[in-house]
Amino acid sequence: MKRIYILIAVIAMLMGGAGCSDYLDDPKPTDVLTANEIYGSKEGVQAYFSGLYRMFRGQYEYEDDSYRTDNGGVYSMYYARSVKGNDIIQRPTWYLYDYAHENREPTYSRVRITWQFDYEMINHANTIIKEVTASTALAEVDKPAFIAEAKAMRAFFYFQLYLEYYSKDSGLKTPPLYKEQVTEAGPMSEPADYEAFMIQDINDAIAGLPEERINKSYMNKSVANGIKARILMALNRDWDQIEVAANAAYGGDVNSALDASIYAGGFNDIDASEVLWGMDQQSDQSNYYYVAPHAFADHNQDAYFGMFVNSAFVSEFTATDVRNEFRNGYGAPVGNYQQFISDKFIFAFDSDMHLMRTAEMVLVDAEANYRNGDETTAHNLLFALQSDRDPSAVKSTNTGAALLEEILLERRKELYAEMGVEWFDAKRLTRGITRNGNHRVFVTLTPNDKRFFLKVPQIEIDANENIDDTVNANR
């Protein structure tokens, strides 16, 4: 049973204007809820967090104060990454420019919305840390968990900026780094400082967060461990720590962490046992047809019918794999981009969106064990997931590089359309993406291709005196 958590009007505290300098002003409390009321009680701070989590699945205003279906919160970033790979095909509808790798210029919507949304959330996290620390009304015993949750949120959104606007080995600088509330926008930052700050934040969050939470749309210690694993994977370092974090995220018992019945449920309920973290929706608090991937992937409900699946990817699934939910729903000829649809996601106005699952963390644990030299454990973890999904699965004899490739393929098979896994892995491993099969638009991204990251938005350049047009010279 889903529970409704009412959004108290903390969203009225969002900042207006265009550039990052505008978003860094102190929040302007309204007559609905004052700063004293927010930080004067545990319930007030929880209400603030509830509003922020609501923004994860919210919509974002475009230049003319309208709303675009492909401009939203976390789900929008995740789905845009998903359609940039080889496994997913997007028909000419919303996200078509992301699919074609064309939505990266300084004035384009993906570039602007992603930057603004991430920094807005970072500013809220900085506000919470500052005000909770200074509050004399809050009980001291309640402060550490709130600060830890804000640091987890800050680390998460700095990580999103890192993925979208930076690429290792590019020689570029990372986006501006704001470690606390400031009133002036800053310059691009040094990657080493940026990375160290993300890691410190998420380590602090893990140390301070409890496992208990209101529901799965909130962060807890397990979620923070999962975020840490992703961050360190992107940095391709500290695989011993990744192993510990992933193991802590899914609980360490691979058998209890996996439940293949999730594939019968439509991936639209965060109460499913494999869901570690998600975005909870109610039919009366819905973003309706904006929700991705569901509104695009589901061809049975009235939505966009926008997502198709590459025939080459479909061929990787055995007939007995529960994840083999592909079919030719339109009677399309072989080779047509509409040849295969997927029934993985079920769309409804109250469809929840998944942000992290235990299955992902099992596969992260497998890769970490491989990289730490324990191929036996890596193979056992991998086969535990494979046999859970496919009762006819046969354990491979792969070792070395072949075992790693098997793990990476399993990540794609397990997580396609959920969080941009194929794009994420190609970027972190400095690999390219070459489309094959029955794609509508064929592209080839070489390792370190500039299309793996976005340019700095023009509105930031115009508003921030510490950043000028030269920032995009090599982007």
Image (tube, grey):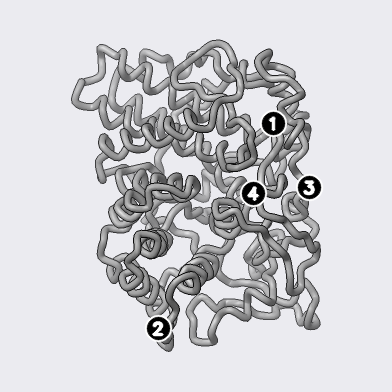
Q: Residue at x 32, y 65 (%)?
A: 257
Amino acid on which the number 1 mark rests in the picture: Val
Badge 4 amino acid? Tyr
Helix, strand or loop for disc 4? helix
Q: Amino acid at mark 2?
A: Lys
Q: Nearer the viewer, mark 4 or mark 2?
A: 2
| Label 1 vs 2, first from the N-terminus | 2
* Quadrant in the picture for the N terminus: bottom left
Q: Circle 1 is placed at which residue position?
A: 456
The quarter holding residue 361 reads bottom left
Viewer-nearest of discs 3 and 4: 3
Q: Nearer the viewer, residue 198 or 67?
A: 198
> Vertical placement of 311 versus 276: above or below?
below
* Circle on res. 395: 2
CA gap between label 4 and label 2 equals: 40 Å
Q: Nearer the viewer, mark 2 or mark 3?
A: 2
- Residue located beneath label 4 in the image: 290
Quick check: can you spot residue 148?
yes
- Point out which mark residue 102 bears: 3
> Label 1 to label 3, Cα distance in Å?
15 Å
Is residue 394 shown above or below 5? below
